[in-house]
Image (tube, grey):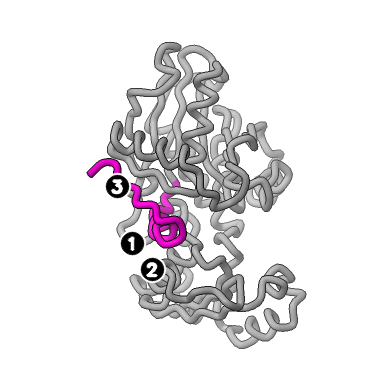
Amino acid sequence: MSSPLTLISDHPGKKSDITLYMKRDDLLHPVVQGNKWRKLEPLVASLQQGKYQGILTFGGPFSNHIHAVASAGRHFGFPTAAIIRGSSVDVQNPTLAHAQACGMQLIPISKKEYDAGNSSEEVKAILDQYAGHYHLPEGGATREAMLNCAKISAEILEQTPGIPAAQRFVAVPAGTGSTAAGVVGGLGDQGTVLVFPAANYGISEERIRSGVEMAFGKTCPPFQCQNGYTFGHFASFSPELIELTREFLSQTGILLDPVYTSKMIWGLFDLLEHGHFPEGAVITAVHTGGLQGWDGFKQRFGVNIYESLA
């Protein structure tokens, strides 16, 4: 199905006749939220056809990807397992407790072995143990995932017809960059994609460009990588960012996640304030889900996103 658009009426660019929408992929699937469903949908179809025994994947202890794969396994009835970064992780944190409740087998290993990937003998042994499973990379970053994420752009083009390419912009957050690559490849020359990395490491323009060319078999169209809004590191805590998220929720009724979409909206509002977009531009910001991350933020930082709205 297609996720809906929500008009954001109050934003810093409204005086320049700029229209801002949010593409609500957080509403896309009742169990597997946001871009995670876009990435997993082709693989779920293969599992239902009996091509694999289950999924073995990788992720950190608070990973949206781990949460999504475990949820999909329980919902669609296939086994799941995950190699978790960090040999001493708290397997009872909200994300991993949910994964275990879904039946996922958790295999924590040291960060050193995890970062070594397939060159690690420990990782190789685990992969051999799950030889019948599909070995899904961290974040679900596969060619099929990127191609399926191109549907985001196709839907945006259908939902906002008749906009000149020079005035059409799509904003998307990035972790591994596979969703961004799909959006860039899917939009092509019909607009400009702005990518907002969630961290200043693990993602780059070159990685996104390579993903587009590998998945779509064509030269990557131009896009903008906005690297100035990472707030230091991946799951960084910032009171200012939390307050923006609360204000956005109060004004729009839309809850952003603490790691990806909140940084994207912060950056997008900053660019709007500084006249980055032409007059009359139409911007669609993609809500990639990840709302389970608030449970981890509450445990780690004591943040209750609703407390100032009570």
Where disc 3 sits, the SS reads: loop
Going from the N terminus, do you reach mark 2 or mark 1 first? 1
Q: Which residues are magenta?
A: 288-310
Residue ID for mark 1:
31
The answer to whether residue 44 shows anywhere in this view is: no
Q: Is residue 235 above or below residue 128?
A: above
Q: Amino acid at mark 3?
A: Tyr
Going from the N terminus, do you reach mark 3 or mark 2 first? 2
Going from the N terminus, do you reach mark 1 or mark 3 first? 1
Of the numbered discs in the image, which one, if any, rests on residue 306? 3
The answer to whether residue 307 shows anywhere in this view is: yes
Task: Identify the residue at image location x=64%, y=32%.
Answer: 224
Q: Position of residue 196 (x, y in %)?
A: 57, 39
Q: Residues within 10 Å of mark 2 (few under 14, many from 20)?
A: many
Q: Amino acid at mark 1?
A: Val
Residue ID for mark 2:
71
Q: CA distance from mark 1 to mark 3?
A: 22 Å
Q: Is residue 274 above or below residue 242?
A: above
**Drawn side of residue 30 relative to residue 61, left or right:** left
Q: Amino acid at mark 2?
A: Ser
Name the image quarter holding residue 155: top left
